[in-house]
Amino acid sequence: MKGASLRQAAWRGHAGAVRAPEAMRSWLTTEGSLTARLVAASSSFRVRRLHQRSATCLADEAGAIGLARPGRVWEREVLLECDGKPVVFGHTVVPMNCTAADWPLFSALGERSLGTTLFYDPLVRRGQLEYARIRAGHPLMGRVRDALGGESDTLYYARRCVYRRRQGLLLVTEVFLPAVLGLAGALQDTTREYETR
């Protein structure tokens, strides 16, 4: 039973519930486009696509996207890199019953940021952010370890959000890597800039 529970994270509706350090909490609670904040905090920004394919959603994702149990979805995983360092692991799932009319650009994103479409499309509605601590045993921990070439911490802070467009749902999970904290000092004079993008 304990092993099964580790495959699901305790997602909370308030960032304070995950008891993240103050600097990390600042990233978790970023309003607006996370991509815009990362761009403002670095000299170079890149989206490195790891894969985009059909898969089975994770156990703690099914309910969030309207499935009674884990089922087939379109899955996209990326690393967001600032100045050559991975700072965020992105994991996105879209139910198979969504159509190209719901998410017309999803299949053609390539190495473009998903945020560039979500935040500038007037048809997209953003749900409530949820927060969690990702520990060993959760599937995303293994995904992060593989993406980083075997390196892994024992705990990561993450957030997720459901987006709606027409009849379609899309769930974005962002796992914040320790290197993101190295960008914090560069953000003191750019807060207003990313919040208005």
Image (tube, rainbow, N blue to C red):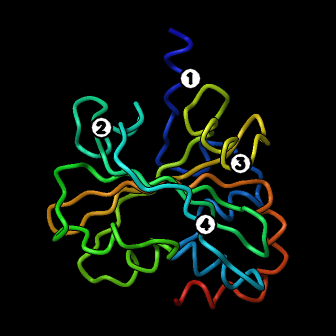
Q: Residues within 10 Å of mark 4 (few under 14, many from 20)?
A: some
The reply to whether discs 1 and 2 touch (Cβ–Cβ < 8 Å) is no
- Residue at 49% x, 55% y is 51
159 or 45, which is in the foreground?
45
Task: Identify the residue under disc 2.
Answer: 63
Real-space CA distance between mark 4 and mark 1, rounded to the nearest whole angstrom:
28 Å
Q: Where is residue 14 drawn, in percent x and y?
A: 52, 50
Tag 2 or tag 4, which sits nearer the N-term? 4
Q: Position of residue 187 (x, y in %)?
A: 76, 80
**Amino acid tagged 3:** Ala
Residue type at mark 1?
Leu
Amino acid under disc 4: Arg
**Of the residues tagged 1 and 3, which is closer to the observer?**
1
Q: Disc 4 designates what residue?
A: 48
Does residue 181 appear left or right of residue 142 in this picture?
right
**Is 16 left or right of 33, judged from the image as shown?**
right
Q: Is residue 112 left or right of residue 119?
A: right
Of marks 3 and 4, which one's residue comes earlier in the chain? 3
Q: Earlier in the sequence, mark 1 or mark 3?
A: 1
Q: CA distance from mark 3 to mark 2?
A: 25 Å
Mark in front: 4 vs 2: 4
Q: Residues within 10 Å of mark 2 (few under 14, many from 20)?
A: few
- Label 1 element class: helix
Q: Position of residue 70 (x, y in %)?
A: 31, 31
Q: Which badge, 1 or 2, is on the more N-terminal residue?
A: 1
Tell me the distance, in whole angstroms, between the alpha carbons under discs 3 and 4. 26 Å
Find disc 1 in the rendering and name its residue: 6
